[in-house]
Image (tube, rainbow, N blue to C red):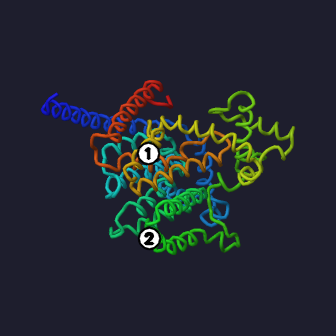
Amino acid sequence: MSIKKISFLANKIQYKEKQLIRISLIISALYLVVRFIDDFFLFSGGVGDEWYFTNDLNYFIENGYHSSVLRGISIPYTLISYAFYQLTNEISISLRLTGSLFTLVLILYFFLRQSNIIHNRRIYFIYLLFLISTTGGSFYGTNDSIFSTSLLIFLHELLFVDAKNKYNHLLLIISSTLAIISRPIVILYLVVFFFSLMFLKIFQKDYNLKRIFSKISLVFLSTIIIVLLFNYPKISSGKYTLSFSTKTTSSEHYIAKDINWVQWFYFSQLVHNQNGSGYFAPMVEWKDVRSYKQLNGDATLPKSFTDYLINYKVFIMKRLPKSLVEVSMISIRYVGILLLLLPLVAYNDFRKKLPLDNLLLIFIIIFGIVSWVILMPNLVQHRHLFPYYVLLLFIYTSKTPKPGLLMNINSINIIVIDIIIAWSLWKEGLFYRI
């Protein structure tokens, strides 16, 4: 084959890839619009986790800030939702406006913010819009989006934006503050992040940790002061804990007051382990957990997540490989084949002297997913993995498109995503809630 023919074929393939990317970006954007209409307008108010945040906002409206913080609320989510409530006079709409606002903030942040790692922006936004649309919880009344958005902005500002950028430190302070006072589980994400940094330092001794920790030290004091000010009602009353939504802080607000979350998750998995393989086990009814507990006693179920981690090690070890298989398979619905092929991409980059940023991302993603797999007795909810999936997208869009493994994977994966979108819209008759 002549050089001219090879060049012609290469140009033709490149043209088709560009056309595929343009069309798929439009498809992902349209899918986002459909899911927004579905979740924001058609999803019943106060259903699922929105019920807890509806109660929090109701309590705030009736009792004010001081009493609400003492009782427990997600402070930034409730305050912003209350501002929308002043305009709409509708609690569910106000909660969903807050969730939708921070989903938009996440999209705009990566669209407008100069990134040192995201080079293939069109492919990145195909993936990001699809991921947001598929994950759920982004547009209806929970604080998922405010937490994930603030956490991701914090990590991106810390790692992948030039320190000389004008608003870097301001964004770090705002994002870290919102993440810390939105959800207590932020501690798990931060532990994973710092553990990954330490692991990278061991693996790559010349990695400059000082650059990152100098940034953190500049914002840490400001963040702590702001967090304490918001939590002043608790501190002044002698309760030296932060305020979070009653969904996570008070057992009296559970649907079943005598059963906690870990008992529900654990028993659901236990039942399906006994009935079959235990893969993709659905949750049982609360009444089934109560009946089992009454019949067998409190000692047969974990009292807390701490108790589960300490005293149910055999169960965890048996559950671990199954849960990893579940996460890998279900991840196709959220990021296509990207997670499945991460070991191949990592090995390929390792042979070519893996970039340190990519290596750090790989550590964060692996340790993050494994930490949730260990923590959850049952099927991991993928909204908890959303931040790790966004970081996963960085790896596949961190290089300029050119013939090779990464571009081939992206081309195949974009087609996979288009098929998933078409299948989803066809299966659900366009909108899920009708």
Q: Is residue 124 above or below residue 429?
A: below
Label 1 neighbourhood size at 10 Å, few (<14), some (14-19), many (20+)? few
Label 2 neighbourhood size at 10 Å, few (<14), some (14-19), many (20+)? some
Percent from the top left, x then y, of residue 188?
59, 57
Q: Quadrant of residue 417?
A: top left
- Gap between marks 1 and 2, in whole Å? 31 Å
Percent from the top left, x then y, of residue 389?
47, 46
In this rendered view, identify the residue nearer to me: 50 or 150. Answer: 150
Name the image quarter holding the N terminus.
top left
Q: Which mark is residue 168?
A: none
User: Which marked residue is nearer to the observer: mark 1 or mark 2?
Assistant: 1
Q: Which residue is mark 2?
A: 215
In this rendered view, identify the residue nearer to me: 91 or 319. Answer: 319
The amino acid type of the residue labelled 1 equals Tyr
Q: Quadrant of residue 34?
A: top left
Q: Is residue 18 left or right of residue 150?
A: left
Percent from the top left, x then y, of residue 229?
56, 72
Could you tell me which secondary element the residue under label 1 belongs to? helix
Percent from the top left, x then y, of residue 77?
53, 56
Q: Which residue is mark 1?
A: 347
Residue at 66% across / 40% down in the picture?
A: 378
Q: Looking at the image, is mark 1 or mark 2 earlier in the sequence? A: 2
Q: Is residue 170 left or right of residue 57?
A: left
The amino acid type of the residue labelled 2 equals Lys
In this rendered view, identify the residue nearer to me: 344 or 299. Answer: 344
Residue at 15% across / 32% down in the picture?
A: 8
Could you tell me which secondary element the residue under label 2 belongs to? helix
